[in-house]
Image: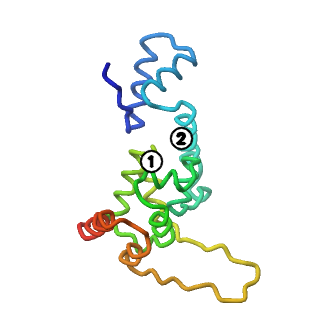
Amino acid sequence: MQERKPSADPSALLHNIRRLSQEAYWDGAELDAALREGGVDPGRLVSRVMADIQRHLQPPSLQAPPRPLLVALRDATRLPPSAIAEAMEAPVTFLSMVSRHPHAVPTGWRRELARRAAQRLEIDQETVMQSFAAPFQFDRAASRDTPIPTDTVQHYGDILARSNLTPEARQFWQDMAEDA
């Protein structure tokens, strides 16, 4: 029996659900089973659709500001950073550096991370792209003996040097930065 691949396009998935629903009466359990058979978690689908609807219903001034990449991925998936990193095939240190220093992230990296998030975590690419607009804010301590460190990451090479990437992964991201 041929295994069905889940659709990465939410609009195609909703179109298929609508078409199949018109062909026969479905109760909730049958619809949930059909979605699971297609590789879709019904609860997660409903949550994502509701979040998208809520975002579009809010006036722009009330919309939540974009969040750094790792925070946005964690909020969307409810997974720990280690599971997100495994799904994205990138170390947590790399995702953390990209989250903290969006100004140093090349366009090619942004597109690749958005593509991976969509394919592997079922997160809208626009959510990922918006995360790069969010400046990272360190939590400020109430009192400190030392000054807050200044940002020393100015270029994507600084991210590559500090991200514990394998040589192959480092070369992949280096090439992706130069191609953009």
Mark 2: few, some, or many residues within 10 Å (few <14, many ≥20)? some
When the figure is inspected, residue 176 is found, relative to residue 147, above or below; the finding is: above
Residue depicted at x 63% and y 84% = 148
Residue closest to the far left:
179
When the figure is inspected, residue 57 is found, relative to residue 134, above or below; the finding is: above
Task: Please indicate whether residue 58 sits to the left or right of residue 117 in the image.
Answer: right
Residue closest to the far bottom:
146
Residue 155 position within the rendered picture, expressed as x and y whole percent measured from the top left:
38, 79
Task: Please indicate whether residue 127 sits to the left or right of residue 137 in the image.
Answer: left
Q: Which amino acid type is marked by label 1?
A: Asp
Residue depicted at x 59% and y 47% = 78
Residue depicted at x 52% and y 14% = 26
- Residue 48, which numbered label? 2
Residue 156 position within the rendered picture, expressed as x and y whole percent measured from the top left:
37, 74
Residue depicted at x 51% and y 20% = 31
Residue 139 position within the rendered picture, expressed as x and y whole percent measured from the top left:
66, 73
Question: How far apart, in angstroms, are the residues tagged by discs 2 and 1?
Answer: 9 Å
Label 2 with label 1: CB-CB less than 8 Å? yes
Quarter of the image that includes the N terminus: top left
Q: Which amino acid type is marked by label 2?
A: Arg
Q: Which residue is mark 1?
A: 124
SS for callout 2: helix
Residue closest to the far top:
24
When the figure is inspected, residue 137 is found, relative to residue 71, above or below; the finding is: below
Mark 1: few, some, or many residues within 10 Å (few <14, many ≥20)? some
Residue 83 position within the rendered picture, expressed as x and y whole percent measured from the top left:
51, 51
Task: Please indicate whether residue 115 sits to the left or right of residue 100 in the image.
Answer: left
